[in-house]
Image (spheres, rainbow, N blue to C red):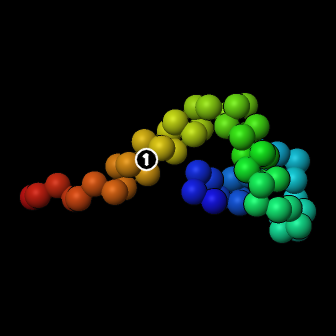
Amino acid sequence: MEDAALEDITRMSDLKPEEIGDLTPSTLEGVLAVCKEINPHFFRLRGRLTALARLPPPEA
């Protein structure tokens, strides 16, 4: 998933890794939407860190 790793979803929900494997992509999107609603700070920070990781390294 683009916005979160499956491990993130297990930390933010009561789903176990083996249960996530049985979910359809659309169901996972629904779970992720609820996670985003409940944990907006996590997703804002994750977005910022991801954007920073894509920047070229500063010149020395």
Element type where label 1 sits in the image: helix
Residue occupying image coordinates x 62% and y 53%: 4
Q: Is residue 51 left or right of residue 57?
A: right
Q: Quadrant of residue 28?
A: bottom right
Q: What is the quadrant of the N terminus in the image? A: bottom right
The location of residue 48, given as percent across then percent down, is: 42, 42
In the shown orientation, is residue 32 left or right of residue 48?
right
Q: Give the residue displayed 57% in from the left and 57% down from the top.
A: 2
Above or below: residue 44 compared with residue 16: above
**x and y, in percent, of residue 33 in the image:** 71, 40
Where is residue 19 shown, x and y percent of the image? 90, 62
Can residue 11 be seen from the camera position used here? Answer: no
| Residue denoted by label 1 | 49
Q: Based on the displayed image, in which of its 4 quarters is residue 60 positioned?
A: bottom left
Q: In front: 8, or 31?
A: 31
> Could you tell me which residue is drawn at 34 percent across and 57 percent down?
54
